[in-house]
Image (cartoon, helix red, strand yellow):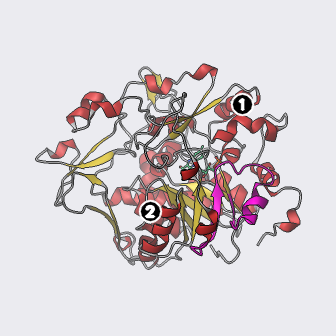
Amino acid sequence: MTLEKPPRILQGGMGVAVSGWRLARAVSLRGELGVVSGTALDTLLVRRLQDGDVGGHLRRAMERFPLPRVAAETLKRFFRPGGRVEGEPYALLPLYRHTVDLARERLQMLAAFVEVELAKEGHGGRVGINLLTKIQFPNLPLLYGAMLAGVDCVVMGAGIPREIPGALDALARGKPAALRLDVEGATTPVHVEFDPALHGEGGAREVPRPDFLAIVSSHSLASMLARKSTGKVNGLVVEGPTAGGHNAPPRGETVLNERGEPVYGTRDAVDLRSLGELGLPFWLAGGQGRPGALREALGAGAAGIQVGTLFAFCEESGFAPELKRTVLKRAAAGDIDVHTDPRASPTGFPFKVVTWDGGREPSRERRRMCDLGYLRTAFALAGASAEAGASAGADTRVGFRCPAESIERYRAAGGDPADTAGRACLCNGLIAAAGMAQPRDQGDEPPIVTSGDDLVSIARFLGGRTSYVADDVLDYLRGPEPAALPLD
Ligand SMILES: Cc1cc2nc3c(=O)[nH]c(=O)nc-3n(C[C@H](O)[C@H](O)[C@H](O)COP(=O)(O)O)c2cc1C
């Protein structure tokens, strides 16, 4: 992405599958930055193939993947021409281990390539990919796959993405990259590594280095990333606590309000003037989905705004259509709640959960188990067996646990049962919200919907409509003076 002409509006990356290629493409076609979500893309690819790849889009993009054998093998293994039989469970990918095997790396590269390729298909607009720093294992192959498709920008938060800029530099040159893995109790550093040269016949390809935007919610993190990252940070997204998805916790001791939500105060506000002194372009995120917000942001020295919630419920978003309709109908009727839940996410970060019908959350009543594993915590194993999820061949043997899995298993993996209270399986719940729920004996996995606080006032934007498209959001955000916001 050439930040000489930065986009004014970033469509926020929204996982799982909410900001897919259709949404990112629609935004990119209008000259702003469309961002695909990179979260769980490997699982999404294999589920969509099992559902018959309606429209043939995935197969069209897979044909262009530089490793044709990988695309062919993936099709052979997962593509079901007529889709699954009603109620048939999806075939699963194995859970991650410390040492990711080459086949899984190739699948991740393919999945990211396909998503970016489709978002960029047939136009010259810019497209970004969003990854959660916290989900460490798949990130390097996902980044390289996205780079093979010419991704313009990488946007990452949910953790401290200090090592990503250097990794992008290395991958762009076709060189190996490594990220330090957070391993509880490890006495020596543990890394996840990825070498592009191990993939593809004639060695690694050199690819353009995308711009890197870090998502931050404090000046101290912004300044640390600007100064101490392993490579160049090209810009910042400053996200406030009303934004959808995960939020940064408040600074200092967490105090909860009467609804059990973390209370944010003036200490959590970012001083934009001193942020500007870092000399990096920045975009404001969280509650910016209203007319006039863009102008105010520009006036405060920002390069623009990042918006999620309004895009999350448009026709091109990846939420299951019936779920989208229900949420919009309930929101328009004033019967919707967005709760900032400090417990729901296995990551421990506050996470926004949307409820209606008086707030029943079937996702908390599901049988606890972990079969997707993206949000598991890694810990150092002392003398445990390889069957417990240990990696072979590394100095530190690594196990995994998730506080949303079965309490007995969590305890057996050294976890404190107190951590399990109130946790929801975001992996299964968010994929279910994208219309790919895993069928279980007791019924399909229940969906979890996340959104920013602005959902409760979306009726103002809807103005009586029951549906809308990404173009409507862009028109609304840009306001009545399109000439003031030239396309590049
Ligand atoms: C449904 C939904 C899912 C989101 N998922 C992610 C995500 O996976 N990664 C991320 O960095 N931000 C995520 N976000 C945050 C958005 O990228 C964006 O910063 C935020 O929505 C902006 O605030 P707003 O919701 O008030 O417009 C998500 C937001 C929504 C609404």
Residue at 40% of width from left, 46% of height from top? Answer: 374
Q: Is residue 304 magenta?
A: yes
Left or right: 317 with respect to 412?
right
Residue 457 visible? The answer is: yes
Instruction: Report which residue position mark 1 lands on.
Output: 331
The residue sitting at the left extreme is: 383
| Badge 1: residue crowd in 10 Å (few <14, some 14–19, many ≥20) | some
Q: Secondary structure at mark 2?
A: loop
Residue 267, image x, y percentages = 54, 52
Give the residue type that dot 1 points to. Answer: Ala
Q: Secondary structure at mark 1?
A: helix
Label 1 with label 2: CB-CB less than 8 Å:
no
Q: Is residue 160 magenta?
A: no
Q: Nearer the viewer, residue 237 or 96?
A: 237
Residue 393, image x, y percentages = 17, 59
Left or right: 330 with respect to 58?
right
